[in-house]
Image (spheres, grey):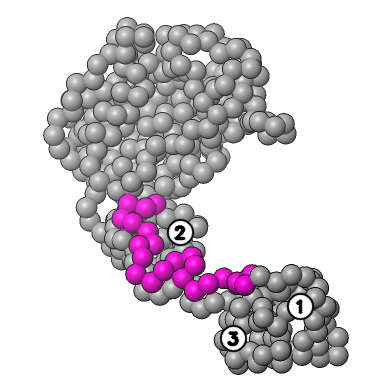
């Protein structure tokens, strides 16, 4: 991998820190997508990345069909108050006979429109009695008919390489009969966690201990992105142990993700281990929460060290870990979407870009961003309560009524 380009310091940010945008740009610039592929079945494809274009080999729908329950007719037979003989009944999954002039066919949603018919009249506009149907509405040609190839044309590109497969893509692939296809192999991500004060849920807490929430925030991200997780567990707070486990993680994975131990404290050994074994390319970001984010390389594996505070892990996971993993997986879209809302709060400006946990109120004419009252980096309940993150830009205070940009959580995974 080529060396990372230098990153200019944002002149508006705190001295010695790099901006969030520059940090993300530099990180993604140093990441190359894995090239190995594998063929999988459609039922196993959720959140995998396509490694080939999918070309339709048929039309969808494959034939002209009725968009609703009703009666297939010939427009030339329709006049005010006309009554037609019901000549046939066509449920979905069957094929009707050519429609005789002066007759109508009882037809159901999805059933092929019989030859000769050029419109379908919804049953609510008809009155059927004793084998005849009265049409009580004006009828236009092609009404309520879904044409062959209207959705997908034979020979067209259905999905392109790099598409991340969501439930809707699974349905789309099934609609063109695609049962197996090539995807990028699963990304291997190794994780380990430091801190003598943290213990696993289910164990009793001793004085000075806390439960390891960060492990489950991070593994939740990784599970949602469908990677192969190599969990190396807890590591003692010593440089020797941290070096040993980091080396083990890097030899087994494409990416190593940790939380904690990347700041400047005497017990923060992860950054020191990274500098001893590999290269630290990026460290201090002009953001809050989450200033200490370490990015580098150990052997052939990339390394991403997230902060130790629970909210900082969540926020930097969204901003850094998610796009990095998508880039390594070969996805063409890595950036989180951003929407606009109106702030119902005031927020002072600062020297770092801040990410505020908000809930979006959609009861009015436009979305309103409501601030969680406690924005501390240890208040993990704020992340669960909120719908997204408002971006409070460097040196730009927010006043109630201002339009603000926010990253919605919905749809990120």
- Residue 239 in view of the camera: no
User: In the displayed structure, does residue 86 sit left or right of residue 251?
Assistant: right
- In the rendered image, residue 151 lying in the magenta stretch gets the answer yes
Name the residue beneath numbered marker 2: 169
Q: Which residues are magenta?
A: 141-164
Question: Is residue 283 part of the magenta span, yes or no?
Answer: no
Residue visible at 46% across and 28% down in the picture: 315
Q: Which residue is mark 3?
A: 116
Q: Quadrant of the N terminus?
A: top left
Nearer the N terminus, badge 3 or badge 2? Answer: 3
x and y percentages locating residue 5 in the rendered image: 18, 25
| Chief SS of the magenta region | loop
Residue drawn at x 36%, y 9% as measured from the top left: 12
When asked about the image quadrant of residue 191, the answer is top left
- Which of disc 2 and disc 1 is earlier in sequence? 1
Where residue 116 appears, as percent x and y from the top left, is 59, 86
| Mark 1: secondary structure | loop
In this view, 337 is above or below 70: above
Q: Secondary structure at mark 3?
A: loop
The crowd level at tag 2 (other Cα within 10 Å; few <14, some 14-19, many 20+) is some
Residue annotated with mark 1: 79
């Amino acid at each position: 991998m080529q060396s990372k380009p230098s990153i200019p310091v944002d002149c508006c940010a705190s001295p010695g820190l790099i901006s969030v945008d520059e940090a993300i740009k530099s990180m993604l610039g140093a990441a190359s997508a894995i090239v190995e592929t594998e063929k999988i079945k459609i039922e196993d494809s959720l959140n995998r990345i396509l490694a080939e274009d999918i070309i339709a080999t048929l039309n969808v729908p494959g034939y002209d069909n009725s968009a609703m329950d009703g009666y297939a007719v010939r427009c030339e037979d329709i006049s005010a108050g006309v009554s037609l003989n019901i000549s046939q009944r066509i449920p979905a999954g069957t094929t009707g006979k050519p429609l005789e002039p002066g007759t109508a066919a009882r037809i159901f949603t999805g059933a092929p429109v019989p030859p000769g018919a050029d419109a379908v009249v919804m049953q609510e506009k008809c009155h059927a009695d004793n084998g005849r149907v009265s049409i009580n509405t004006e009828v236009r040609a092609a009404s309520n008919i879904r044409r062959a190839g209207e959705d997908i044309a034979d020979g067209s590109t259905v999905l392109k390489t790099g598409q991340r497969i969501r439930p809707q893509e699974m349905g789309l692939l099934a609609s063109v009969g695609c049962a197996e296809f090539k995807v990028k192999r699963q990304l291997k991500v190794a994780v380990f966690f430091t801190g003598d004060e943290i213990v696993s849920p289910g164990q009793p807490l001793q004085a000075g201990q806390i439960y390891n929430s960060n492990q489950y925030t991070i593994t939740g991200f990784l599970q949602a992105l469908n990677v192969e997780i190599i969990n190396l567990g807890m590591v003692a707070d010593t440089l020797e142990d941290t070096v040993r486990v980091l080396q083990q993680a890097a030899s087994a994975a494409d990416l190593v993700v940790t939380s904690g131990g990347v700041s400047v404290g005497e017990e923060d050994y992860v950054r020191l281990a990274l500098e001893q074994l590999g290269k630290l390319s990026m460290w201090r970001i002009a953001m809050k929460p989450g200033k200490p984010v370490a990015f580098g390389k150990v052997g052939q594996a990339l390394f991403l060290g997230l902060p130790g505070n629970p909210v900082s892990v969540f926020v930097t996971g969204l901003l850094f870990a998610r796009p990095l993993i998508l880039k390594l997986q070969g996805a063409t879209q890595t950036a989180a979407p951003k929407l606009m809302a109106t702030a119902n709060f005031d927020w002072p400006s600062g020297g770092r870009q801040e990410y505020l946990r908000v809930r979006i109120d959609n009861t009015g004419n436009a979305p309103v961003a409501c601030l969680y009252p406690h924005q501390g980096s240890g208040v993990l309940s704020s992340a669960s309560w909120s719908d997204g993150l408002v971006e409070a830009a460097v040196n730009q205070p927010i006043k109630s009524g201002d339009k603000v940009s926010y990253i919605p959580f919905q749809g990120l995974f």
